Amino acid sequence: MDGFVFAGWVVRIPDIKHQTHASVGALGLALLGVSAGAVITMTLTGRLCRRYGSRPVTIVCAVLLCLSVALPPLTHSVAALGAVLLVFGAAYGGLNVAFNSAAVDLVAALRRPIMPTFHAAFSLGGMIGAGLGGLVAGSLSPTRHLLALTVIGLLVTAVAGRTLLRHDIPVPHSEERAGAAPRRLDGRTRRMVLVFGLIALCTAYGEGAMADWGALHLRQDLGASAGVAAAGYTCFALAMTVGRASGTTLLERLGRSRTVVFGGSTAAAGMLLGSLAPWVWAALLGFAITGLGLANLFPVAVERAGALAGPSGVATASTLGYGGMLLGPPAIGFVADWTSLPTALTSVAVLAAVATLIGATSR
């Protein structure tokens, strides 16, 4: 539901831009409301989860997300759009921290590394939301489309929320229960949480870069058609979904450290191919390999941070990761101005290599 609702909003951004008569720069400032709301709320949601429990907070944030996605079509100025997107971003950031905290509890109770499965569901929801949004964009106004997302999201929340509140997650016998933070977070624990946050940052940097610059690279540098250029991110997202769907099996066979090392090195190689190859087909293959490599790094980082420090660890890793997603697109834009877009895109490979190094040295 989270990925579905967010992707549904993203595909209507051009319509909202036209409705509000916003320039590109003004729209960019308004869209910062999503990022600002998410980052601010992520730091607070960990405290709310410790006080009230991750599952009630998940439900509240999900309801707020579903309601707020219907607000952008009702705005007629950039200032109003920025204000409602601040609320939308706050709900989005809070929901991601809250249900990742609940998922960490479940991972600890089941004693299986199933976190990638949840993130695969997010990726799948995003693909479905974007696909359906593109199909109905010509027949439904943004108001009706996003209101439909509100109704669908509230129905899903009602069904899922009832289960979350009625059934307690079994408490593991081990003292490594993820839902409860350690009695005392010593310096080593805090440093390890930051290490996992850096892995999340390196991963999300690549996701943001692929979403914003992948199609332009195919179109501008390799001469691909508009349809083929649009397929670039689809290849990346589909490969990431497949990688996350098989992530539990991979983690059970290789373990977390080897999965991070294998995934980071795969992503680095894939992005070097995707950014430097002179042929469109090779770039598309590189994008797919990058998606496979990055797929499980973020879930592993968030799960380990939550296992060490509870909801606060999830909040820290998520905030750093989301910061990487915000940092990626403008950083690549600046570097592309100085050099070229293919050269700038190799920074994704560099940070994937950094994640590999972190995984290898912090076993």
Image (cartoon, grey):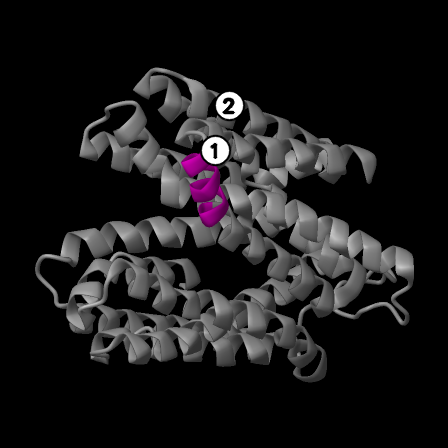
According to the picture, the residue beneath numbered tag 2 turns out to be 272
State the image quarter where residue 138 is shown. bottom left
- Nearer the N terminus, badge 1 or badge 2? 2
Would you say residue 283 sits in the magenta stretch?
A: no
Give the position of the N terminus as an image quadrant: bottom left
Residue 80 image offset from top left, x and y in percent: 30, 80
Give the position of the C terminus as an image quadrant: top right
- Tell me which residue sits at (35%, 64%) in the image: 5
Does 286 sit left or right of 187 as displayed? left
- Tell me which residue sits at (31%, 36%) in the image: 216
According to the picture, the residue beneath numbered tag 1 turns out to be 344
Q: In the image shown, does 285 or 253 lie closer to the viewer?
A: 285
Residue closest to the far bottom: 52
* Mark 2 residue element: helix
- Please name the predominant secondary structure of the magenta segment in the image: helix
Q: Which residues are magenta?
A: 329-338
Q: In the image shown, does 121 or 20 lie closer to the viewer?
A: 20
Residue density around tag 1, few if under 14, some if 14–19, many if 20 or more, within 10 Å: many
Would you say residue 333 sits in the magenta stretch?
A: yes
